[in-house]
Image (tube, grey):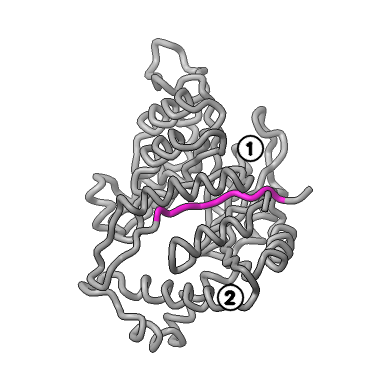
Amino acid sequence: MAATLSLLDLATVELDAAGEGDSAGALAHSVELARVAETGGYARVWYAEHHNMPSIASSAPAVLIAHVAAHTERIGLGAGGVMLPNHAPLVVAEQFGMLAQLHPGRIHLGLGRAPGTDGATFRALRRTYADAENFPNDVLELQSYLSGELPRNAVNAYPGRGTRVPLTILGSSLFGANLAAQLGLPFSFASHFAPQALQAAVRHYRSTYTPSETHPEPHVSAGVNVIAAENDEAAEFVFARAELERVRSFLSRGRETPLTRDEAAALIDTPAGREIRGMLRYTAIGGEERVRAELAAFAEFADADELITVHPTPTRAEQLASVRIAAPAG
C-alpha cells in the first residue's frame, strides 16, 4: 500500500530586507494552503511550535488549528508538534480536548521533547532544560487526561476527558523512536531537516514496537521536502533558490540585519553552508511524474506509512503550486 501524504505548514512569514514581516499574511496563507491540501487529497496538515523566530508564525499551534479548522471542512489538522516541555500536560489536554469537541475526528497531537527555541526564550517561557527530562512521564500524564480513565474526583481535563485525541511521538533520534515503541504510539521522524538517523530510528521503532489497544500495529511518518513545478527544469531552478534562502535564513540568525542574497551566495559552499544544505538531503524535486516517483522511492527507503511533505519554496505562489502538483488527487 502506498504511503499517505500529509503536509507540514510552518506559517512562514516573508521577511523584508530589514527582517520585518507580516504575520497576518502568513496566517491567511496557512488557510489557503490547507484548503488546497484538502482539495488535493492530503490526509492531514501539521503545524509546528516555534518561538522567537520572526520567520515562523506558528508559535501557538492550537490557536492556528482552531482557525484553519473553521475555514476547512474535513482535512485532519494536528500539531507537529507541541513541544511538551514548554507546557503543563493538563493545559495541552484542555486545549486539544476543546479542539476535538469543536471538530470531532479531525484533531491530532504530535508531541516533541525539544523546546523549539533558544535558551533565553526557553527561560522566558518559565521553563528549564530539566523539564525535557520529564517528557516520558508528561506524555503518560497527558494520555491519562485524554483517556477519561482518571477518577472524577481527581484532576481532570475539561474538555479533554474521554476525547482520546490521537497522539504521535516526534523525534530526530533513537530517543523518540524508543519511547514511541514502548508506549505503542505512532512515530514521526523529522527527516526533512535531520536526515542522519532516519533508517536506524525507524528500524529500532518497528523491531521493538509494543502493540497497544489504540495502535496494535506500528505507524511511521517521515518528513520529506518537496519542490514540485511545471517541469523538472523549473523545479531544479526553484530548488536552487530554496537552498540559497535556507542558507541565508540560518546564517542571518542573531544578526540585526539579515544577510543579502549576494552575501548568502558567497557562503553557500563554506562548511556552514554545506551543513545547512545537507538538511535538505531528502527532497523530491521535479515535475509531477518525477516527484511522484521520488516520493514513492523515499517512502520505501524510509519504510514509512505516511509522508509529511514540506514545501520550502521561496515564494507562496510557488508553494501553492508545489502542493497542488504533488497532491495525491492531482
Residue type at the position of mark 2 = Ala
Give the Cα separation between the discs numbered 1 and 2.
43 Å
Q: Which residue is mark 1?
A: 184
- Principal SS element in the magenta part? strand
Of 304 and 327, nearer the camera is 327
Q: Which residue is mark 2?
A: 234
Question: Is any part of residue 23 visible from this angle?
Answer: yes
Comes first in the chain, label 1 or label 2: 1
**Left or right: 132 in relation to 282:** left
- Segment tinted magenta in the rendering: 3-11
Nearest to the eye among marks 1 and 2: give it: 2
Secondary structure, mark 1, is: loop
Where residue 119 sits in the image (x, y, percent)?
28, 58
Q: Residue at x 66, y 54 (%)?
A: 202
**Left or right: 7 in relation to 19:** right
Q: Which mark is residue 310?
A: none
Assess whether residue 283 is covered by the magenta stretch: no
Where residue 291 sits in the image (x, y, percent)?
67, 65
